Image: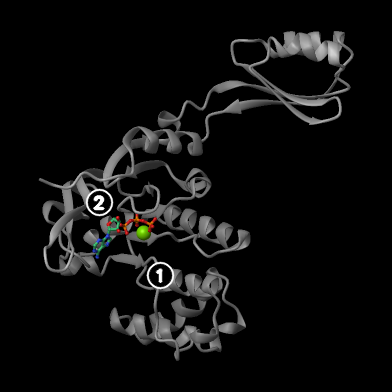
Amino acid sequence: MYAINTENLTKDYALGFWRKRPYRALDRLTLQVESGEVFGFLGPNGAGKTTTLKLLLQLVFPTDGRAEILGRPVGDVAVRRRIGFLPENPYFYDHLTAIELLEYFGRLLGLSSREREARVPRLLDQVGIGAERRLPLRRFSKGMLQRVGLAQALINEPEVVFLDEPMSGLDPIGRRMVRELILGLRDRGATVFFSSHILADAEAVCSRVAILAGGRLAAAGRLTDLLAFGVKGWEIVVDDLGAEALGRVQGLAAKTTRIAENRYALEWPSTVQPERILTDLAAAGATVVSLNPVRDTLEDFFVRQVAEHGNQRISPA
Ligand SMILES: Nc1ncnc2c1ncn2[C@@H]1O[C@H](COP(=O)(O)OP(=O)(O)OP(=O)(O)O)[C@@H](O)[C@H]1O
Ligand SMILES: [Mg+2]
């Protein structure tokens, strides 16, 4: 059984006031997420990530296709209790304190007072909300609200957790906190489905990703399979490279970038053995500052996929 399963999931929004025309936000998304996976749902702005999450949470209804969570149709009451959700822009009653808010959601989800007493402070610790937990939320910064939102999403110890841009608005420490939290959820056996357009975040925690562009699935799979993680080439930074030697190596290098007087970054394709280049450079009297393999990053892949598939939509017929 899949944790999440969609088949041809499609959403048209009506655009225009007098003459409504359909606008396809999501186009036949078919996707399976295994139980216990951390799944990254990636795509540029407007790709349809939030629309997909809203469909999975039944905040909007599909034009076509279907979706299941934990083997049941979305909206199944028993399943709802087993899922957690962090919206893109969490909005809370801002006169409540963080403790009161979590207490409120805990009660809403039918947790006993003993469960709430145990979970609320633990979750706030986990997301790094300290003494501020007794302040009204209107005094919280965006990043702090995001942390409270995360705690709220986890109050019922969900089996499937949906996070819409969980790292947005967070500083580097906050991002690391979210990564650790996600990995902790995975270790507990939960499935995490999160959207992001920040690829480094996905690279750090995901087993598999899907890339959405223009409402369509552009690619899905294990990161290691999607990317040629192999070395694409070599970058060597050299110092003391005289004009004459530069002329000689320039002809062989794929790219030469001048950093400073006599200091250059040189790039070679992977077909050239780095040992040979180093010998040649040493013979020319240059000093090697660094040698780095150039790899295809998720960023490169993402840019390529979006370029190939486009982020524009074709209106449904
Ligand atoms: N309620 C709505 N009515 C009309 N169009 C909508 C509505 N909600 C979303 N859209 C459109 O659907 C497309 C997909 O939007 P969506 O919010 O799902 O993108 P996203 O991938 O979450 O983007 P972002 O990274 O900016 O959050 C966008 O072009 C958006 O303008
Ligand atoms: Mg969004």
Residue 16 seen in the current view = yes
* Residue at mark 2: 4
Count of numbered marks: 2
Residue 100 x/y as whole percent: 44, 88
Q: Is residue 265 left or right of residue 17?
A: right
User: Mark on residue 308?
Assistant: none
- Residue 246's quadrant in the figure? top right
Image height of 251 relative to 302, above or below: above
Q: Which of these two is toward me, 255 or 160?
A: 255
In the image, what residue type sits under mark 1?
Asn
**Picture quadrant where residue 294 is located:** top right
According to the picture, the residue beneath numbered tag 1 turns out to be 89
Q: Nearer the viewer, residue 128 or 16?
A: 16
Per the image, label 2 sits on a secondary structure element best described as strand
Closer to us: 95 or 269? 269
Residue 303 in picture, x, y percent from top left: 45, 37
In the image, is residue 173 above or below residue 95? above
The residue under the point 38% across, 42% down is: 209
Earlier sequence position, callout 2 versus callout 1: 2
Instruction: Indicate how the structure is coloured in the image.
Output: one colour
- Name the residue: 53% across, 69% down: 127
Q: Is residue 290 left or right of residue 305?
A: right
- Between the C-alphas of marks 2 and 1, the distance is 23 Å
